Image: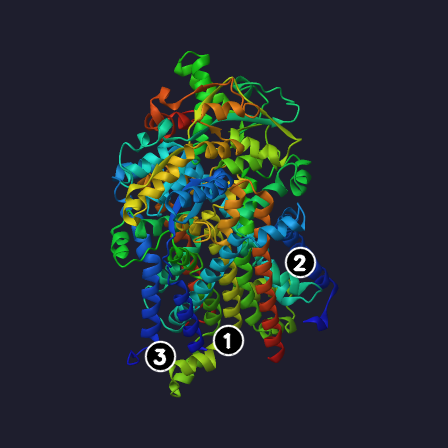
Amino acid sequence: MDNNVTTSEKITKWLLIGISVLFLAVMLLLPLLTVITEALRSGWKVYAAAVTDEYTIKALLLTVKATLFAVIFNTIFGIFAAWALTKFQFRGKKLLTTLIDLPVTISPVIAGLIFLLVFGRQSPVYFFLLKFGIKVVFSVPGIIIATVFVTFPFISRELIPVLEAEGTDEEEAAALMGAGGWTIFWKITFPHIKWALLYGIVLCTARAMGEFGAVSVLSGHLRGKTNTLPLHVEILFNEFQYVPAFAVSSLLVIMAIIILVIRSVIEYKGKKEA
Amino acid sequence: MKKRNKPVIPGFGLSMGITISILSLVVLIPLASLVIYTAKLSFKDFIETITRARVLASFYTSFVAAFAAAVINGIMGTILAWVLVKYEFPGKRLMDGMIELPFALPTAVAGIALTSLTSDTGLVGSFFAGFGIKIAYTRIGITVAMIFVGIPFVVRSVQPVLEKMDNSCSEAAGVLGAKKSTIFWKVIFPELKPAIFAGTGLAFGRCLGEYGSIVFIAGNKPYYTEITPLIIMSELQEFDYSSATAIALVMLAVSFFILFLNNVIQQRNARILKGGNA
Amino acid sequence: MIRKIFALSLAAVLALTPVQAFGKTVSITNVSYDPTREMFEQYNRIFQEHWKEKTGEDVEITQSHGGSGKQALEVANGLDADVVTLALEYDIESIENAGLIKAGWIDNFDNDSSPYTSTIVFLVKKGNPKKIQDWDDLTRDGVGVVTPNPKTSGGARWNYMAAWAYADKKYNGDETQMKDFIRKLYQNVVVLDSGARGATTSFVENEQGDVLVAWENEAYLSMRDYPDEYEIVTPSVSILAQPTVAVVDEVVDYRDTREVATEYLNYLYSDEAQEIEAENYFRPTNEEILKKHSDVFDLSVDLVTISEYGGWDKVQKKHFADGGIFDEIYER
């Protein structure tokens, strides 16, 4: 592309870059900087105390657990769903796609509410599960379910457009030559979708870590037991602990940055090989 | 399951089975509870609940703000994806890496940070206040928060398609003497369109339902900056499950409708692109 | 790869399986509302000592804090709380209505089961530039008020009722005029946050409005963070805000913790506990200890109780239910 650069092309290029940079700076960087400056407003000592607090660490571990679970679950689901939706023709496909997307567009408040209605004390399911000693709401399983729900379509969403653009010719050819399902997937489909899958996993991880609304409804805010990091932030904030609240939020920002760096490294290496 | 005549590719039964069963467990059954609880209201009560002046006003606020935010995200997201894929410039990697950050930040924190930035004493807000524009505690503020939570959707759905897109087509058009803008609108844009729509649709839905950040920035004035999720929350606080689920059901129906429409458009596009056999 | 994924998911599932260790420790959960954390942190420590002395048992206390109404909703939906210590009686009543607490709980502890109280005051900028002295000043043109939404915040219902109580005295119970008064007041509201903490942020951090209507203890917490920027104005009439406590019968019966749960709430009335409550800016119900802290608490304010308006059930229906007075004043 860069061989025959004309002036107008150059102008367009820098104009678009300029717009992008400005947009990201105002919409993204400034809020993040606000979080960091607020976190450090009372100095490093307060910051260190807030992030090494026993309850912060417990909340961090729970967040990691819920995120890990959501990512694994949704990856498995996402691959199967994308395969089913793009490699075959069937009736009701649009409906199915829509239903998969639906959780993202459901208000977190409603998402929390529906699980409360299904698994809460209002519902016979609650007492049924209690007989087996299983409690979903206001305990860890509820938090995981809520996290899975809000990130449900993230991975399939990334895979579907790529697979759609790819078409089915290669897989059909392979199948006609007698290759099995797994072979086709690993040898032909996977190389096409691996970057999309990576995007999806990162998106899912980020969203799972930061999820607040739905988890908040289902957690019960039991300190040290069912508090995730975002909930811990909310609690600190509501307890008039403004600075520690931002300090704990900055942890989430740092975690996100770590994940994004890892992604960049994988991507960079992978693309260099290709 | 491999014995089906039509599809040559194996795995239909397995992948379909897994998809449907997980979908039912995670999405369909829980959503059915909304319908069940709403059904406790008579039809007349249902209509009355969802047409209360305050509820209607909140629908208006939520939809207008979410629509504006989705359009802005659609445009900016496409530009961002384009810039990230097609151009090389210093800091690009950093920019690419930042896109998902809005997801990781708890929405409440985002709301508090955005409010302090855009209130008339804040860094951004004081600038706009000079022009007599108030951001925080107005519908503009709601839109700003929605844009924030929706950024990654469009970028990340357009980006992979752009990356995979063959340059040969647009290069051929270039050799044939087509203008750059013509190439974009006639060759590239149609291919991007499904991804843009998909991303924008998701962003719209996400914006519509957003609660955590908006309650801080909105000011929550009845009839003006009160969003629908907030109304649902206050119904819940009054233990009025059926009213809460009734309003939730309306939002759900709208989300569903928009997504469905979106998918119909997309698949039609996909068919056109593939010459009718995709 | 696939095997790896399965192994990982299996590991995740195993990690989720709850491991419960049973020792001599008895553990209880206290579901409370937002700004009581520091108080209960201190209180839990003295209670642990007290219980050890009394029975020789160690007691482990898990705290949960959140908006009062939301906490009640969660307990009603299965959050295992041995005791609830919420912002108002109405929230505990809703747990009662869900069948977890037996009727008559309000008489189980002294003072209508409210060991400490508070009231509604104004937080204004230092020097009180808008000269805000009483509720009347909040209805003046050009005064911006910040208060949370009583529909979403249980605590904010006290704010509203305090203004109502003042209007009641001022207009001798003429409801048309009272409604007008409240309408004017809420027309001056510049930000109607969903909770008390959000309202404080709007006022203190984002400098919205001229006066924050807040609980006394919360106003003092803001003062502690910004000692030189704000001051507290106590109005002539306010309401006696009674945070209420109760033992959750269904949970204590199932977990066999009734004894320790009951003592946990009883001990809130002890002198040591009352001191801690006062230090955290709640008004202790013990008159002597309250008087000792009269430098903090303005004791001249005329405090009206909610029972004068027929209790929370009635107030809730009349004012805050859909179509109630709070909706009415916003109708156009």
Q: Which residue is mark 2?
A: A16
Q: Amino acid at mark 1?
A: His
Q: CA distance from mark 2 to mark 1?
A: 29 Å
In x, y percent, where is residue C197?
Answer: 52, 38
Q: Amino acid at mark 2?
A: Leu
The residue that appears at 58% across and 50% down in the rendered structure is A50
Decide if residue A23 is on the left or right side of residue C150.
right
Specify the subunit that label 1 lies on.
A
Label number found at residue B10:
3
Q: CA distance from mark 3 to mark 1?
A: 18 Å
Determine the secondary structure under disc 3: loop
Q: Which residue is mark 1?
A: A192
Specify the subunit that label 3 lies on.
B
Which-is-in-front pick, marks 2 and 1?
1
Q: Are marks 2 and 1 on the same chain?
A: yes
Residue occupying the far top of the picture: C172
